Structures are given as structure tokens and as C-alpha cells.
Amino acid sequence: MNDNEMLFRRLIDELVREWEEDEKWYAALSDLTSVEELERLSKDDSWTVREQVAGNRSSSVQILSELSKDEMYRFVNRLL
């Protein structure tokens, strides 16, 4: 990762802390969002934000494991 990408990731991480749900949703979806920020977003109050974290290729196994225990995830899967 080059210096510009590292700077961009750091800026995204700082900005996301102040964002509204729809902005967090996009950050959770972005490949440029750091694993640390994805971990924080994986605990967001919004199911749609957590769902995007689960679909992010950069999410760690640990994040995915925790999200698989999410009550809303189990509820949605029962509906399908």
C-alpha cells in the first residue's frame, strides 16, 4: 500500500466516526476502509451497516465470526 492509500484510509477512519448511517454504510462497503474501522462498524447499531461489513472482502475472519452470531442475522435468515 502506498503512502496516499494509507493517508486516505486514515482519513476515512477519522471521518466515519462522525458520519450518519448512510455514510457509514458506504464506508462499510469500501475496500479502502481499514480492518480496525470495519471492526468498529461491525458493532454499529444499524443492521444495514453491519450487513455491509459482512459483505466487505477486507473483513477479517474474526469480524465475520462475530457477525454470524448477530441476532438480526439469525432473524433475517429465518425469514428467508
Image (spheres, rainbow, N blue to C red):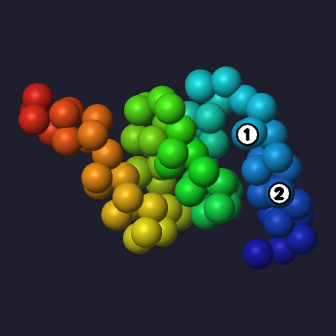
**Coordinates of residue 4 in the picture (x, y in percent):** 88, 64
**Coordinates of residue 75 in the picture (x, y in percent):** 19, 34
The residue to which callout 1 is attached is 16
Residue 66 visible within the image: yes
Q: Residue at x 36, y 52 (%)?
A: 67
Q: Residue at x 41, y 70 (%)?
A: 61
Q: In the rendered structure, which amino acid carries the disc numbered 2?
A: Arg
Q: Is residue 42 left or right of residue 27?
A: left
Q: Quadrant of residue 22?
A: top right
Q: Earlier in the sequence, mark 1 or mark 2?
A: 2
- The correct choice, above or below, for 3 with respect to 74 in the image is below
The residue to which callout 2 is attached is 10
**Coordinates of residue 49 in the picture (x, y in percent):** 49, 36
Q: Nearer the viewer, residue 55 or 15?
A: 15
Q: Quadrant of residue 77?
A: top left
Q: Secondary structure at mark 1?
A: helix
Q: Residue at x 65, y 62 (%)?
A: 36
